[in-house]
Amino acid sequence: MAKNKPNTVKTATELIAPVLEELGIDLWDVRFEKEGSQWYLRYFIDRLEGDEALTIQDCEAVSRKIDKLLDAADPIEQSYILEVGSPGIERELTQDWHFEICQDLKVTVRFIRPVDGERDFIGSLVGKKEKSITILLEDEREMVFTSDEAAYIKLYADFDDGGNRG
């Protein structure tokens, strides 16, 4: 009978929770993904409350603490590279709560397959219900699609306008 192996992302998330709570930092996302022949464990962290911005020193502090916890727990069989960083201004929306806190903000959606000949759309996030996502396009049309149809949904930053999410 096969041994029931715990989910790597779930285990990694549970390990970092007390570290982030101690430092007053929020977890945006955790990913365990392969690029080429190398595996990466990526923690995306932020400060979602208050006026204090996330700093490189915050990322370093989290990295040092979680590195020790990961070494002690040894939850991942293969070798991997640990990365701790900010999700960035064009952060990807992957969790239901991401869609809640980003409602009414501008997003970029890239579809897996073209819709009316196009794969990329920009609009204001109206909301998400289960797998159904609604955005309001610039021409005031509502676009409704499922999360399975999108390659990604990210916050939009207009770099020609100084990075505003407008």
Image (cartoon, grey):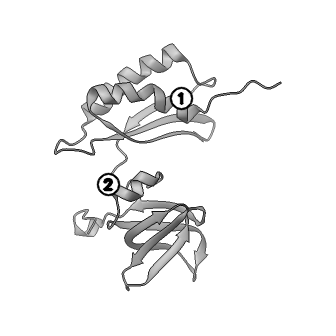
Q: Is residue 47 left or right of residue 82?
A: left
Q: What element carries label 2?
A: loop
Q: Is residue 146 above or below residue 60?
A: below
Q: Nearer the viewer, residue 9 or 81?
A: 9
Instruction: Give the residue displayed 55% in from the left and 18% down from the top.
Output: 74
Residue that carries the numbered disc 2 in the rendered image: 89
**Numbered label attached to residue 11:** 1
Q: Percent x, y for residue 107?
A: 39, 66
Q: How many labels does the image show?
A: 2
Q: Can residue 81 be seen in this view?
A: no
Taking the view exactly as shown, the residue that stands out farthest to the top is 72
Q: Identify the image quadrant of residue 85.
A: top left
What residue do we see at 57% from left, 22% from top?
A: 75
Q: Which residue lies furthest to the left in this view?
A: 51
Q: In this view, does 23 lie to the left or right of 36?
A: left
Give the label, 2 or 1, closer to the camera. Answer: 1
| Residue displayed at 46% across by 25% down | 15
Q: State left or right for residue 46 relative to residue 151.
A: left
Q: Quadrant of the C terminus?
A: bottom left
Q: Which amino acid does label 1 sit on?
A: Thr
Indicate whether 2 appears above or below 150.
above
* Mark 2 crowd level (few <14, some 14–19, many ≥20, 10 Å Cα): few
Question: Which one is in front, 18 or 73?
Answer: 18
Above or below: residue 66 compared with residue 51: above
Could you say which quadrant of the image residue 127 lies in?
bottom left
What amino acid type should be assigned to the residue bearing mark 2? Ile
* Residue 114 image position (x, y, % from top left): 59, 75
